[in-house]
């Protein structure tokens, strides 16, 4: 429950503007109901998960934070990055190998997804993986590419990671 | 066998799935959407699809036949995709219900093989009010708008014009737009006379639209009125439901203060059309032209959204933000959402309530399903569906809601506040109506909307004195706050 500091109305959790008086609840600060008043820097302050741009410049690199692991993985961008887990039997070694992050237990397929580089965007494609790929909670349809944004949450099976552009 | 649907996607499995995978996928899906397990409206629609998909894929012989007929669709491009952004990706595990918002964008995917420059072909009917009250400026502007629309159309388009008062006249019967000069003259001959009975006009308009009704056309009736119709509103709404089933959309525009906005909203909402308030006669021309232009840039038509929340989740509201802000009735499903333009996504904001939850981990929230006819090629009932899930965790990292949701919701809140104030005034609750209008004025000021804020203050005073809102004030606030929701033109992103 969230009590409005302005009118004392009790709102349900998750409500972003008081349902009684329209007072905004976002963060600890007040956000006005118009986007031009919120500048991008402010919305990107540290310690919070943010929603960023879809633009991926040539020469940028990709930073992957796997949930519950301190050290990020930095990947050089190339046209196609295979995400999965390595298989010693076949000698398959994906560009982003999640085997060492408990990928097998979390349901990551050997060939799970591709991150592809386009003109000035990155796209994510599920390769028909057994346990599916989710982008910000939305399950991807196999072989249908989706544009990635800076800060997006990707889930492969039950393994969650965040992708950042650098 | 109809192989136009991707049955594997309906069961959420890859085409290489084994029979065991298929059975398991069916069991999981049935547990989510079977009407005995899930009372939500929309769940039954998904379950029917799931059961039909399983009937074929679960039988190896039928599956082989399906796979064979499906081959011709294997290289079918995606005509549109769904992009869903939740207000939160990780929810706190709480022993109380919580609200989650989903911003759904239906994004057209253009392909080189399609003629992109070609505009959609229209099967358009204008149903124009010519009651006595339209006399003068109003009718003059309507005629100008009519003539300009004729100018916009091409011989590939079909047009009819119906004028009505207490009876309907088919001024121009449905026909391809070839003799523009002749048509313009017909429009100029309209004379104002008589009362307003919308049903007659609407019925004649829908009948005209039916004459050229086709899956490759945008079949649309635009109603323009300045009056209130008496006793035939239910008939009109019934007709709208019928028109929707046949693939005809209805847009409704009201001029002045007399007309019933809730009624026109409902006409539009039932058919995926748009409704608007035109406060000055001069604005008629721009409004009608814009509407026709928007219809003409349709890429997909007869778009329908079906939402199936999980059994313990409930859908509370749906609001269409783009191409034009429009409240949408959540029942019956599927919900008509109009046409998908070439260059602009349709965006829709959904509000759902999640149940109290002590269990942590990933869970599904809802399945969203959008179908539509792709114009320009013969592809009807193209379907994309998407499963949405969130993670439930204990004290997750605080998450800033996405800007697009904050922005839309901030404005939608203003519209809702106005709606609540209006409801309070209608039920005679003067104190509440006054308070709500004052709150609205505060918020409008904070959002930099000084004129609307001023209007809210004036109406708050009026309510406290006369116990009623003025029609003009009420409509200005309603459609003014609704118009705030119009998104800026698409930017560089995406």
Image: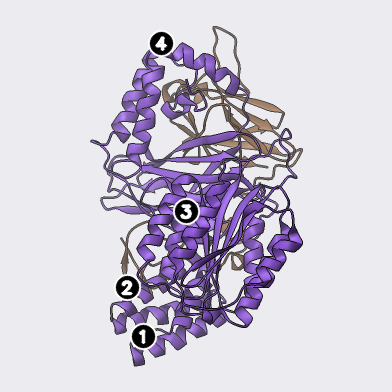
Chain colours: A brown, B purple
Whether label 1 touches label 4, CB < 8 Å? no
The residue closer to the viewer here, B61 or B84, is: B61
Give the residue number, with chain letter if any, for mark 4. B60
Q: Which numbered mark, 2 or 1, is in the foreground of this view?
A: 1
For the residues beneath circles 4 and 2, the answer to whether they share a chain is no
Whole-angstrom CA distance, mark 2 to mark 1, is: 27 Å
Chain for disc number 3: B
Which quadrant is home to the N terminus of chain A? bottom left
The disc label shown at residue B468, or none: 1
Give the residue number, with chain letter if any, for mark 2. A8
Instruction: Please state the horizontal and vertical placement of residue B45, each as a whole percent of the image.
Output: 36, 37
The disc label shown at residue A85, or none: none
Which residue corresponds to the image point at 57% horizontal and 8% vertical from the top-left? A90
Which quadrant is home to the C terminus of chain A? top right
Which residue corresponds to the image point at 43% horizontal and 72% vertical from the top-left? B260
Residue lying furthest top in this view?
A89
The residue closer to the viewer here, B19 or B475, is: B475
Whole-angstrom CA distance, mark 1 to mark 3, is: 32 Å
Give the residue number, with chain letter if any, for mark 3. B271
Instruction: Choose the circle earlier in sequence order: 1 or 4.
Output: 4
Chain for disc number 4: B
Assign a secondary structure to mark 3: helix
Relative to A123, residue A11 above or below: below
Q: Which numbered mark, 3 or 2, is in the foreground of this view?
A: 3
Assign a secondary structure to mark 4: helix
Instruction: Please state the horizontal and vertical placement of residue B21, each as a whole percent of the image.
Output: 39, 17
């Amino acid at each position: 429950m969230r009590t409005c500091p302005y009118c004392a109305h009790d709102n349900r959790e998750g409500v972003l503007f008081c349902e009684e008086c329209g007072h905004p609840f976002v963060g600890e600060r007040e956000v006005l109901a118009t986007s031009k008043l919120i500048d991008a820097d402010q919305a990107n302050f540290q310690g919070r998960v943010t929603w960023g741009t879809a633009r991926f410049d040539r020469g940028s690199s990709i930073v992957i934070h796997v949930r519950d692991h301190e050290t990020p993985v930095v990947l050089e961008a190339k046209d196609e990055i295979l995400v999965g887990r390595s298989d010693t039997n076949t000698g398959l070694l994906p560009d982003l190998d999640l085997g060492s992050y408990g990928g097998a237990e979390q349901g990551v397929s050997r060939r799970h997804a591709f991150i592809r580089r386009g003109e000035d965007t990155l796209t994510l494609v599920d390769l028909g993986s057994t346990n599916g790929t989710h982008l910000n909670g939305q399950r991807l349809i196999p072989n249908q590419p989706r544009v990635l944004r800076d800060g997006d949450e990707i889930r492969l099976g039950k393994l969650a990671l965040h992708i950042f552009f650098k | 066998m109809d192989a136009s649907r991707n049955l594997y996607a309906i069961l959420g499995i890859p085409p290489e799935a084994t029979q065991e995978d298929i059975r398991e996928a069916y069991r999981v899906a049935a547990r989510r959407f079977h009407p005995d397990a899930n009372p939500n409206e929309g769940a039954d629609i998904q379950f029917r699809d799931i059961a039909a998909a399983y009937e074929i894929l679960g039988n190896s012989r039928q599956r082989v036949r399906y796979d064979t007929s499906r081959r011709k669709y294997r290289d079918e491009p995606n005509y549109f995709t769904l992009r869903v952004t939740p207000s939160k990706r990780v929810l706190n595990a709480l022993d109380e219900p919580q609200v989650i918002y989903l911003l759904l964008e239906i994004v057209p995917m253009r392909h080189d093989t399609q003629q992109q420059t070609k505009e959609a072909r229209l099967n358009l009917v204008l149903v124009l009010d010519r009651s006595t009250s339209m006399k003068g400026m109003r009718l003059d502007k309507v005629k100008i708008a009519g003539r300009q629309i004729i100018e916009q159309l091409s011989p590939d388009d079909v047009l009819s014009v119906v004028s009505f008062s207490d009876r309907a006249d088919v001024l121009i019967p449905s026909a391809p737009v070839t003799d523009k000069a002749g048509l313009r003259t017909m429009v100029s001959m309209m004379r104002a006379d008589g009362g307003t009975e919308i049903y007659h006009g609407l019925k004649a308009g829908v009948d005209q639209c039916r004459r050229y009704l086709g899956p490759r056309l945008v079949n649309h009736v635009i109603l323009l009125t300045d009056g209130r119709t008496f006793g035939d509103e239910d008939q009109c709404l019934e007709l709208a439901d019928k028109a929707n089933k046949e693939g005809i959309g209805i847009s409704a525009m009201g001029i002045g203060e007399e007309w019933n906005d809730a009624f026109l909203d409902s006409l539009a909402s039932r058919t995926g059309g748009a409704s608007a308030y035109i406060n000055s006669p001069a604005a008629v021309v721009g409004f009608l032209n814009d509407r026709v232009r928007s219809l003409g840039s349709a890429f997909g038509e007869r778009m329908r959204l079906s939402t199936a929340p999980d059994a313990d989740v409930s859908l509370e509201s749906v609001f269409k933000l783009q191409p034009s802000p429009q409240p949408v009735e959540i029942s019956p499903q599927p919900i008509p959402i109009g046409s998908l333009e070439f260059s602009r996504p349709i965006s829709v904001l959904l509000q759902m309530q999640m149940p109290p939850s002590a269990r942590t981990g990933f869970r599904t929230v809802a399945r969203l399903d959008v179908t539509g006819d792709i114009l320009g090629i013969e592809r009807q009932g193209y379907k994309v569906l998407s499963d949405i899930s969130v993670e439930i965790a204990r004290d997750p990292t605080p998450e800033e809601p996405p800007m697009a949701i904050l922005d839309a919701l901030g404005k939608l809140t203003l519209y809702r506040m106005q709606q609540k104030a209006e409801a309070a005034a209608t039920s005679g609750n003067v104190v509440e109506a006054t308070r709500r209008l004052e709150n609205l004025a505060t918020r409008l000021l904070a959002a930099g909307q000084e004129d609307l804020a001023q209007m809210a203050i004036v109406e708050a005073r009026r309510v406290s004195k006369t116990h009623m809102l003025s029609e003009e004030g009420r409509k200005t606030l309603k459609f003014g706050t609704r118009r705030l929701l119009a998104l800026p033109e698409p930017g560089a992103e995406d």
